[in-house]
Amino acid sequence: MNIVILAAGMGKRMNSDLPKVLHALAGKPMLGHVLDTARVLSPSRIVVVYGHGGEQVPTLLASADVAWAKQDPQLGTGHAVIQAVGLLDESVPTLVLYGDVPLTAPATLAGLMRAAGQDKLGLLTVDLPDPSGYGRIVRGLPGSGDASSSSVQPAKLAGRGPILRIVEHKDADEAIRRIGEVNTGILVAPTVALKRWLAALSNDNAQKEYYLTDIVAMAVAEGMPVVGAQPAAVHETLGVNSKSQLAELERIFQRQFAQTLLDAGVGLADPSRLDVRGKLIVGRDCFIDVNCVFEGEVVLGDRVRIGANCVLKDARIETGTDILPMCHIDQAVVGKGSRIGPYSRLRPGTVLGEENHVGNFVEMKNTRTASHSKANHLAYVGDAVIGARVNIGAGTITCNYDGVNKHQTVIEDDAFIGSDTQLVAPVTVGKGATLGAGTTLTRDAPAGELTISRAKQVTVPGWKRPIKITPK
Ligand code: UD1
Ligand code: CA
């Protein structure tokens, strides 16, 4: 099949400068979700009709398998499809999707394709308790339809008459407005017939637009069967016209994702308090506490536990590691059996070895450690290479930046860094060296020795505290 995705509309009610289809759902533009769904169906061609927001849309979502057709000005859904027809393969049907309807399941579209086959017009319709605003599906009397088309309709539609036409809400009278079955906008048509119908569209209607929906009456007039199919869930057909509808679909998406995690055996303290904005790959017997956010690609090994209120982005946490509450981990790797947090921040380029401990208010950036090293309290470790069994005392800081350049700190195996130490990089602490508390290290510390830089402690005999002077 061909797939045409309509994405030219402006989305006035989003109240935003960003084109509507670029607004993110689960961290990805809505149009990106629709493109992913389209790809699952292995179409021979994908054409996106864009317009509002100019080149931002094709620039952001450029891909070798997508062709772009510009619609400017935007004169309606029929006019939008006309912009794409030159790019379509006439030997296969054309499926029309909307760039602002992000949650349609591939299985629902496959069902619609099956119902329509190669030679029928197929419409995805849905029954809504409040159908206002939508195009209504007008059907004839039951039994008056084409027998071949009704036999492929899903059970839900059994007993309904044949589809005759679609009437837009703004063009509908009271009787038609009472119809609860609406057009989702998603349809499939034989491509040659589609081109013929589009060429015959007029804009003689309430909105002075070229309605794609007018092709339905044209198909009926030609005697082509029109079949309806319905989605497994109503939310699959919900479009986004406002931030509030976007937020609603976000919750639906997240709840479904949480369910797939639960089904795969992941423990979740509360499936309604988890946000995954990307890809989350989880091993066996993991547990995720409330209010965690996962972005980009995050991989959790077996038996990993993530405490409450953690944000992980493009990170890998290896087997058996505990991430305690309130951690922020971005482009970092944590080795097996480690304990991070509470309140740790691991920044890009941090790669920790096995059984490391990183505690509260410790920030690490572009730092590698070997196994069994610790920085348990209040430290900044940046651009460092740290060996095994190193202990970094509270308040330690790598002074990695001279105001212009970044420099490296090397701390070799078994070194002990006393509290409140400044390591002025570039500098190396040798194997097994000890730094006394309060040291400002500006030259390398030799292996195995105690190095200390500290003013000598003195006691001033008889010193008195100042007394308050009272003005006269
Ligand atoms: C359309 C349908 C209506 C259906 C509803 C479902 C028509 C005439 N009406 O109405 O039957 O119930 O969707 O939501 O088709 N678009 C363009 N170019 C345009 C106009 C629209 O690309 O010139 C795109 C929009 O970006 C959007 C989609 O087409 O993705 C639907 O447009 P919208 O204006 O929301 O259509 P409705 O009036 O809601
Ligand atoms: Ca709409």
Image: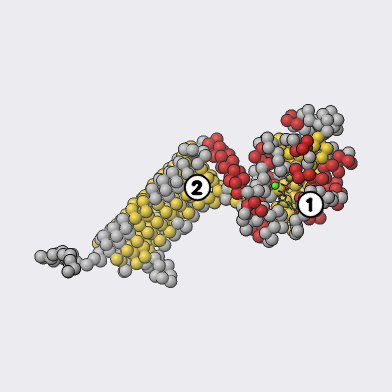
Disc 1 residue type (three-letter): Glu
Name, please, the residue furthest toward the left: 462
Rendered image quadrant of residue 449:
bottom left
Which residue is label 2 attached to? Answer: 293
Task: Residue 356: tell me if it is visible.
Answer: no
Lateral position of residue 316 relative to residue 445, left or right = right
Lateral position of residue 178 relative to residue 90, left or right = left
**Residue 124 position in % (x across, y down):** 74, 39
Which residue is label 1 attached to? Answer: 209
**In the drawing, what numbered circle is on residue 401?**
none
**Residue 307 position in % (x across, y down):** 43, 43
Which residue is depicted at the point 68% across and 41% down?
237
Disc 2 residue type (three-letter): Val
Which residue is depicted at the point 43% across and 71% down?
404
Task: Residue 101: tell me if it is visible.
Answer: yes
**Residue 277 position in % (x across, y down):** 55, 48
**Cβ of mark 1 under 8 A from ligand 1:** yes
Residue 367 versus residue 284 in the image, above or below: below
Observer-nearest of 202 and 64: 202
Lateral position of residue 420 relative to residue 80, left or right = left
Q: From the image, which quarter does the C terminus lie in?
A: bottom left
Observer-nearest of 274 and 16: 16
